[in-house]
Image (cartoon, grey):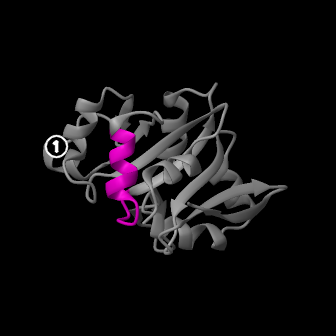
Amino acid sequence: MVSATAKLGALFNEGLTTYAILDGAQVPELRQRLHASGLEFVCLYRGEIPDDLAQVAPYLVALNRSDEFTAWIVQQGWGNAWGIFARVDSMINMTEVRKHFRTFLKVEFPDGKSRYFRYYDPRVLFDYLPTCNRDELSKLFGPTITSYVVEAEEQNVALQFTLQKGLLVCADVKLR
């Protein structure tokens, strides 16, 4: 069994802020836990939304390495597809990060209809990123995202996605 400390080590880097995008449909009592945490968070959906939708909506939260909420996410959520993690330069504020991630909530299909895109599901992001061309990768990372970290199928591995010279690089991060 991989320790929470090892998972936390894979998520945090000096000079970067680690955000989680958590799926309210996957995380039990997410809204209640976020409100109790004291951490900065925001729903990715805009405006007033009905309570039933707010319960299953995606939430962006700025994580703190030593916070109980962060420990809970990595202890209980790792391996359960609760969400993805993104590292961002610490100078970029949550409003900018939210704006970036909101642009991917809906995608337009060839039939002209738009549908929700659940990129914040680690299984979806893992499958989607390698299919992206340079322009799509440039948009996904934008000027904001330094790297994405997602849980791997192997319990003791995290996957770190970075963009280097316009190309996607996926590195296994061994958790000990």
The residue sitting at 74% across, 55% down in the picture is 163
- Above or below, 133 against 146 in this view is below
- In-front residue for pair 74/146: 74
In reply to whether residue 77 is colored magenta, the answer given is yes
Provide the major secondary structure of the magenta segment. Answer: helix
Taking the image as drawn, is residue 105 in sight? no
The local crowd at label 1, few if under 14, some if 14 to 19, many if 20 or more residues have their Cα within 10 Å, is few
- In-front residue for pair 27/25: 27
Taking the image as drawn, is residue 143 in sight? yes
The residue sitting at 28% across, 59% down in the picture is 26
Residue 115 location in percent, x, y? 39, 63
Residue 150 location in percent, x, y? 52, 60
User: Which of the image's four quarters has the N terminus?
Assistant: bottom left
User: Which of the image's four quarters has the C terminus?
Assistant: bottom right
Residue 19 location in percent, x, y? 49, 41
Q: Which residue is labeled 1 in the image?
A: 50
Residue 120 location in percent, x, y? 44, 57
Which element is circle 1 on? Answer: loop
- Above or below, 62 against 104 in this view is above
In reply to whether residue 68 is colored magenta, the answer given is no
Highlighted magenta segment, given as a residue range: 69-82
- Above or below, 104 against 67 in this view is below
Q: Residue furthest right?
A: 165
- In-front residue for pair 30/151: 151
Instruction: Tally the numbered discs.
Output: 1
Q: Quadrant of residue 131?
A: bottom right
- Above or below, 120 against 146 in this view is below
